[in-house]
Image (cartoon, rainbow, N blue to C red):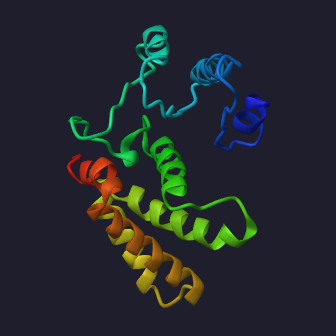
Amino acid sequence: MDWFRAMRELNRSGAAAFVGTPGSGKSVGMKYAADTMVQWNAVGAVVAPTQGEYGVLVGLWPKESVWWTFGAGSDLRFSPFRLGRHARESRLVAEGFLSVLLNITTRREDQRASLVLQRALASLYEGEKWDMDRFLLCLDAERKDEQRRQEERDVADLFLGLLEHYRDGETGRALVVTMEKTT
């Protein structure tokens, strides 16, 4: 995979899956990819339920790395809206996070969904409070805007429904609930 092209030339984030049999080099490849991305000042997340292998990278990059744990015992207060050093960078991170959470792909049929998300995020970052509750208000404004196409208003309604649903489920306990508590 050409990591550099996606991040530097196309200015896009992406996802990769490393699949193989035990001993085939998956962990080595993932560590190399993560190390390379950190060197490029990229923002990324590694999902590693066993948590053992990636502690080395946090040790190598202590100023650039954060070790997050989710789950019943975690006291993490996580907000995808404040992960950047400034509004522009935070907006890009939030867009990537929400695109995954809301299952927005780069397919042509998802372009309206992407527009709705981008407009709501633009509205969010015009204000001073960047959190889930404020983002939901921005989505609600998109849903109620009579000047928007009906398809876009329906997408905003769908996103609101999904995010509200996440408050009550397992995903909500791991993500949305902690997002609300962040100031």
Q: Is residue 71 left or right of residue 31?
A: left
Residue 135 or 30: which is nearer the viewer? 30
Residue at 43% from the left image edge and 39% from the top image edge = 86
Give the total number of marks visible in the rendering: 0
Q: Is residue 42 left or right of residue 90?
A: right
Q: Position of residue 130 (x, y in %)?
A: 33, 53
Residue at 63% from the left image edge and 73% from the top image edge = 112
Indicate whether 13 appears above or below 125: above
Q: Position of residue 168 (x, y in %)?
A: 27, 64
Q: Position of residue 71 (x, y in %)?
A: 29, 40
Look at the image and tell me in which quarter the N terminus lies. top right
Res 37 seen here: yes
Indicate whether 126 appears above or below 70: below
Using the rendered view, name the quadrant where residue 37 is placed: top right
Q: Is residue 100 left or right of residue 162?
A: right
Q: Position of residue 4 (x, y in %)?
A: 75, 29
Residue at 37% from the left image edge and 66% from the top image edge = 163
Using the rendered view, name the quadrant where residue 7 is placed: top right
Res 149 seen here: no
Residue at 23% from the left image edge and 40% from the top image edge = 72
Residue 70 or 5: which is nearer the viewer? 70
Using the rendered view, name the quadrant where residue 99 is placed: bottom right
